Image (cartoon, helix red, strand yellow):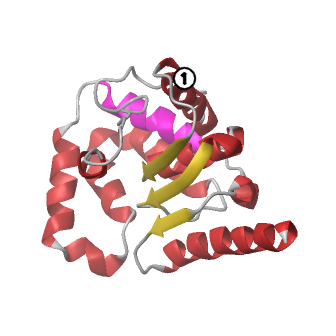
Amino acid sequence: MFQSAHFSNWYQTLAVDLAGYGRSPDIEIGIRTSDQAEACWALLDAQGHDKVILQGNSLGHLVTLHMVRQQPDRVLALVVSGCGYVSKPDGFLGWMRRYQNEGIKVRREQIFDHFAPAAREYAYLKHYADMVVATNHERTVANLIAMNEGLSHLDGDSIYEAIKCPTLIIAGISKVMWKTITNIVNVAFALAQMEM
Protein backbone atom coordinates (compact mmCIF):
# COMPACT_ATOMS: atom_id res chain seq x y z
CA MET A 1 0.00 0.00 0.00
CA PHE A 2 2.86 2.39 0.75
CA GLN A 3 4.16 1.97 -2.81
CA SER A 4 0.72 2.70 -4.28
CA ALA A 5 0.33 5.83 -2.18
CA HIS A 6 3.78 7.08 -3.16
CA PHE A 7 3.49 6.43 -6.89
CA SER A 8 -0.07 7.75 -7.10
CA ASN A 9 1.52 11.21 -7.10
CA TRP A 10 2.72 10.55 -10.66
CA TYR A 11 0.78 7.55 -11.97
CA GLN A 12 -2.66 6.04 -11.78
CA THR A 13 -2.20 3.18 -9.31
CA LEU A 14 -4.33 0.17 -8.54
CA ALA A 15 -3.67 -1.92 -5.41
CA VAL A 16 -5.07 -5.45 -5.45
CA ASP A 17 -5.94 -7.59 -2.46
CA LEU A 18 -5.13 -11.08 -3.71
CA ALA A 19 -7.54 -13.91 -2.95
CA GLY A 20 -7.48 -14.66 0.76
CA TYR A 21 -6.26 -11.17 1.70
CA GLY A 22 -8.08 -8.03 2.76
CA ARG A 23 -11.63 -7.89 1.46
CA SER A 24 -11.06 -10.30 -1.43
CA PRO A 25 -12.84 -13.65 -1.48
CA ASP A 26 -11.25 -16.62 0.24
CA ILE A 27 -8.80 -18.73 -1.72
CA GLU A 28 -9.67 -22.36 -2.25
CA ILE A 29 -7.45 -25.41 -2.64
CA GLY A 30 -6.46 -25.72 -6.29
CA ILE A 31 -6.08 -22.00 -6.97
CA ARG A 32 -2.55 -21.39 -8.20
CA THR A 33 -0.48 -18.27 -8.45
CA SER A 34 -1.03 -18.22 -12.22
CA ASP A 35 -4.81 -18.12 -11.59
CA GLN A 36 -4.37 -15.06 -9.37
CA ALA A 37 -2.29 -13.45 -12.15
CA GLU A 38 -5.10 -14.05 -14.66
CA ALA A 39 -7.56 -12.45 -12.23
CA CYS A 40 -5.28 -9.39 -11.96
CA TRP A 41 -5.16 -9.09 -15.76
CA ALA A 42 -8.97 -9.30 -15.86
CA LEU A 43 -9.15 -6.48 -13.31
CA LEU A 44 -6.74 -4.34 -15.33
CA ASP A 45 -8.73 -5.04 -18.50
CA ALA A 46 -11.97 -4.07 -16.76
CA GLN A 47 -10.32 -0.78 -15.74
CA GLY A 48 -9.20 -0.16 -19.33
CA HIS A 49 -5.45 -0.48 -18.76
CA ASP A 50 -3.29 -1.73 -21.63
CA LYS A 51 0.39 -1.14 -20.83
CA VAL A 52 1.30 -1.31 -17.15
CA ILE A 53 4.13 -1.13 -14.64
CA LEU A 54 3.74 -3.99 -12.18
CA GLN A 55 4.88 -3.99 -8.57
CA GLY A 56 4.57 -7.13 -6.47
CA ASN A 57 5.59 -7.70 -2.88
CA SER A 58 5.95 -11.10 -1.19
CA LEU A 59 3.29 -13.39 -2.70
CA GLY A 60 2.53 -10.54 -5.09
CA HIS A 61 6.01 -10.83 -6.59
CA LEU A 62 5.15 -14.35 -7.77
CA VAL A 63 1.82 -13.12 -9.13
CA THR A 64 3.55 -10.36 -11.11
CA LEU A 65 6.10 -12.84 -12.50
CA HIS A 66 3.18 -14.92 -13.80
CA MET A 67 1.58 -11.78 -15.20
CA VAL A 68 4.78 -11.03 -17.11
CA ARG A 69 4.84 -14.60 -18.43
CA GLN A 70 1.18 -14.44 -19.47
CA GLN A 71 1.27 -11.07 -21.27
CA PRO A 72 4.87 -9.85 -21.56
CA ASP A 73 4.12 -7.24 -24.21
CA ARG A 74 1.82 -5.35 -21.85
CA VAL A 75 4.41 -4.92 -19.08
CA LEU A 76 6.50 -1.75 -19.37
CA ALA A 77 8.48 -2.42 -16.18
CA LEU A 78 8.49 -4.75 -13.21
CA VAL A 79 9.30 -4.05 -9.55
CA VAL A 80 9.51 -6.99 -7.15
CA SER A 81 10.19 -6.83 -3.44
CA GLY A 82 10.06 -9.05 -0.42
CA CYS A 83 10.89 -11.98 -2.66
CA GLY A 84 12.98 -15.09 -2.40
CA TYR A 85 14.03 -17.86 -4.72
CA VAL A 86 12.31 -21.19 -4.13
CA SER A 87 13.28 -24.22 -6.18
CA LYS A 88 11.44 -26.94 -4.26
CA PRO A 89 7.88 -27.09 -2.90
CA ASP A 90 8.98 -28.53 0.47
CA GLY A 91 8.74 -25.25 2.37
CA PHE A 92 5.22 -24.47 1.17
CA LEU A 93 4.02 -28.01 1.77
CA GLY A 94 5.62 -27.98 5.23
CA TRP A 95 3.79 -24.77 6.18
CA MET A 96 0.57 -26.17 4.75
CA ARG A 97 0.86 -29.24 6.99
CA ARG A 98 1.75 -27.15 10.03
CA TYR A 99 -1.31 -24.95 9.54
CA GLN A 100 -3.44 -28.08 9.15
CA ASN A 101 -2.03 -29.59 12.36
CA GLU A 102 -1.32 -26.56 14.57
CA GLY A 103 -3.69 -23.87 13.35
CA ILE A 104 -3.21 -20.11 13.35
CA LYS A 105 -0.59 -20.03 16.10
CA VAL A 106 2.18 -20.71 13.52
CA ARG A 107 1.42 -17.63 11.42
CA ARG A 108 3.81 -15.32 13.26
CA GLU A 109 6.54 -17.96 12.96
CA GLN A 110 5.97 -18.22 9.20
CA ILE A 111 6.19 -14.44 8.83
CA PHE A 112 9.59 -14.41 10.56
CA ASP A 113 10.71 -17.39 8.47
CA HIS A 114 10.62 -15.14 5.39
CA PHE A 115 13.46 -13.02 6.77
CA ALA A 116 17.14 -13.54 7.51
CA PRO A 117 17.86 -14.55 11.12
CA ALA A 118 19.55 -11.22 11.94
CA ALA A 119 16.53 -9.25 10.70
CA ARG A 120 14.13 -11.13 12.96
CA GLU A 121 15.22 -9.00 15.92
CA TYR A 122 14.41 -5.66 14.26
CA ALA A 123 11.61 -3.73 15.94
CA TYR A 124 10.01 -2.79 12.61
CA LEU A 125 9.82 -6.46 11.60
CA LYS A 126 8.14 -7.32 14.89
CA HIS A 127 5.71 -4.45 14.27
CA TYR A 128 5.05 -5.76 10.74
CA ALA A 129 4.37 -9.26 12.12
CA ASP A 130 1.98 -7.78 14.69
CA MET A 131 0.11 -5.94 11.93
CA VAL A 132 -0.22 -9.07 9.80
CA VAL A 133 -1.34 -11.24 12.73
CA ALA A 134 -3.92 -8.59 13.65
CA THR A 135 -5.66 -9.29 10.31
CA ASN A 136 -6.41 -12.92 11.31
CA HIS A 137 -10.06 -13.96 11.09
CA GLU A 138 -12.04 -17.21 11.16
CA ARG A 139 -11.01 -18.17 7.60
CA THR A 140 -7.32 -17.24 7.83
CA VAL A 141 -6.08 -20.80 8.43
CA ALA A 142 -8.08 -22.19 5.49
CA ASN A 143 -6.74 -19.38 3.29
CA LEU A 144 -3.13 -20.00 4.38
CA ILE A 145 -3.47 -23.74 3.75
CA ALA A 146 -4.85 -23.08 0.26
CA MET A 147 -2.18 -20.42 -0.48
CA ASN A 148 0.68 -22.68 0.51
CA GLU A 149 -0.80 -25.54 -1.51
CA GLY A 150 -1.10 -23.26 -4.54
CA LEU A 151 2.43 -21.95 -4.09
CA SER A 152 3.79 -25.50 -4.02
CA HIS A 153 3.21 -25.81 -7.78
CA LEU A 154 6.50 -24.23 -8.81
CA ASP A 155 7.64 -23.18 -12.26
CA GLY A 156 11.36 -23.30 -11.59
CA ASP A 157 13.67 -20.94 -13.39
CA SER A 158 11.42 -20.81 -16.46
CA ILE A 159 9.27 -18.15 -14.80
CA TYR A 160 12.13 -15.68 -15.22
CA GLU A 161 12.55 -16.29 -18.94
CA ALA A 162 9.51 -14.17 -19.86
CA ILE A 163 11.02 -11.04 -18.33
CA LYS A 164 11.89 -8.67 -21.16
CA CYS A 165 11.12 -5.39 -19.46
CA PRO A 166 13.25 -3.26 -17.14
CA THR A 167 13.14 -4.88 -13.72
CA LEU A 168 13.93 -3.56 -10.25
CA ILE A 169 14.49 -6.09 -7.49
CA ILE A 170 14.27 -4.82 -3.93
CA ALA A 171 15.66 -7.51 -1.69
CA GLY A 172 17.55 -8.13 1.49
CA ILE A 173 20.98 -9.65 1.78
CA SER A 174 20.18 -13.27 2.54
CA LYS A 175 21.47 -16.00 0.23
CA VAL A 176 17.89 -16.75 -0.84
CA MET A 177 17.42 -13.17 -2.02
CA TRP A 178 20.69 -13.19 -3.93
CA LYS A 179 19.67 -16.44 -5.69
CA THR A 180 16.53 -14.66 -6.94
CA ILE A 181 18.53 -11.65 -8.10
CA THR A 182 21.12 -13.85 -9.80
CA ASN A 183 18.47 -15.80 -11.72
CA ILE A 184 16.63 -12.71 -12.91
CA VAL A 185 19.83 -10.90 -13.90
CA ASN A 186 21.18 -13.99 -15.73
CA VAL A 187 17.98 -14.40 -17.72
CA ALA A 188 17.76 -10.68 -18.50
CA PHE A 189 21.41 -10.68 -19.64
CA ALA A 190 20.84 -13.74 -21.86
CA LEU A 191 17.76 -12.14 -23.43
CA ALA A 192 19.64 -8.89 -24.05
CA GLN A 193 22.43 -10.83 -25.76
CA MET A 194 19.91 -12.62 -27.99
CA GLU A 195 18.37 -9.31 -29.08
CA MET A 196 21.73 -7.84 -30.17
Queried whether the magenta region covers residue 59, the answer comes back as no
Q: Which residue is mark 1?
A: 45
Describe the element under mark 1 as helix, strand or loop: helix
At label 1, the amino acid type is Asp
Q: Quadrant of the N terminus?
A: top left
**Secondary structure mostly taken by the magenta-highlighted segment of the chain:** helix
Q: Residue at x 41, y 37 (%)?
A: 144
Query: Measured along the vertical axis of the image, is residue 114 above or below residue 46?
Result: below
Seen at 68% across and 56% down, the residue is: 163
Magenta stretch holds residue 149: yes
Query: Can you give x and y, in whole percent of width and height, for residue 192 in the image?
Result: 77, 70
Compared across the picture, whether 113 is left or right of 39 comes to left
Span highlighted in magenta in the image: 139-152
Where's residue 30, x and y in %?
Answer: 61, 27
Image location (x, y in percent) of residue 13: 35, 39
Residue 93 visible in the picture: no
Where on the picture, by quarter, is residue 70?
A: top right
Of residue 81 and residue 6, the one placed in the foreground of this image is 6
* Rendered position, 70 above or below 95: above
